[in-house]
Image (cartoon, helix red, strand yellow):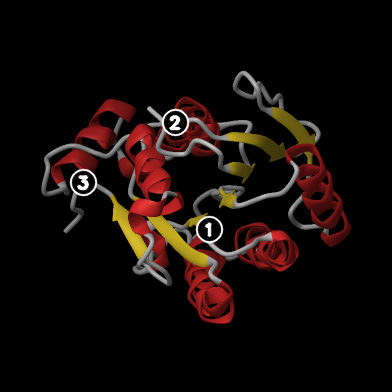
Amino acid sequence: MTLLTGRRVVVTGGANGIGAVVARRFADLGATGVVLDLASATADPPEGWTSAPVDVRDEDSVREAVAESARRLGGVDGVVAAAGVVPSWQRLDALDLDDFDRVVAINARGVACTIKHVAPVLGPGSTITVVASLNSWRGDPNIVSYAASKHAALGVVRSAALALGRSGVRVNAVAPGPIATDALRGRMESRQDVTGLGVDDALRRAAESTALGRIATAAEVADAIAFLTSDLSSGVTGQCVNVDGGIH
């Protein structure tokens, strides 16, 4: 398939989880790119892609990573901001504000920093897609910091779409629901004492909350991002596309 042939793409948080699935899918669709992630992350980029270190909390790190990516690729016309963190459960009355700051620094400030530094290297027809969350539009009493950070990230997306639209750059988000990654399974396992549910039961309950009767997959999230990166979505900007199986 050649949907993304010729696209030069940067994927933050691309070493693991959804970001890694996006990078592989984009490579299959013809894109070339650079996977950006923490130096401590073990990146295994797709064939023809490279990797470089970045810490989205550090503006100098982001500036350098973007410049290096543009140099390697000869330019950048697609960005996927997938770097993010999900904190452990904390009720509001036990909220650790230092951890709150850490989560917001990665999930919201990191998105803003990424867009700030990629925008100058993007030309007409370029795209930025942010991996948001269902918690971008609904709250959760157990992960207040995460919900706050993802609400903020969506605000950055909508504002950036207005700021960059007249330059021909489109900015959108995707909002996955629960995705059965190793990280989600680990979180479900750690919450068993609170929820009383094993991992399989927790996944089953999550599936039952959707219109499709199943949870969406990381591959389906990657396909939605591919659509938003391609010319098929040329009239779409400032939007948040839910990829959650129809959570209700």
**1 and 2 marks in contact (CB < 8 Å):** no
**Which residue is tagged 2?**
29
Question: Callout 3, which amino acid?
Answer: Gly
Of the pair 208 and 241, the residue shown nearer to us: 241
Looking at the image, is mark 3 or mark 2 nearer the viewer?
Answer: 2
Whichever of callouts 1 and 2 sits on the residue coming sooner in the sequence is: 2
**CA neighbours of label 3 inside 10 A, class few (<14), some (14 to 19), many (20+):** many
Q: Is residue 69 visible?
A: yes
Q: Gap between marks 3 and 1, in whole Å?
A: 25 Å
Q: Quadrant of the N terminus?
A: top left
Name the mark on residue 245.
3
Asked whether, in this view, residue 121 is left or right of residue 159, the answer is: right
Residue at 65% from the left image edge and 21% from the top image edge: 44
Q: Of the residues tagged 3 and 1, which is closer to the observer?
A: 1
Q: What number is the disc on residue 127?
A: 1
Q: x, y (%) of residue 228?
A: 40, 53
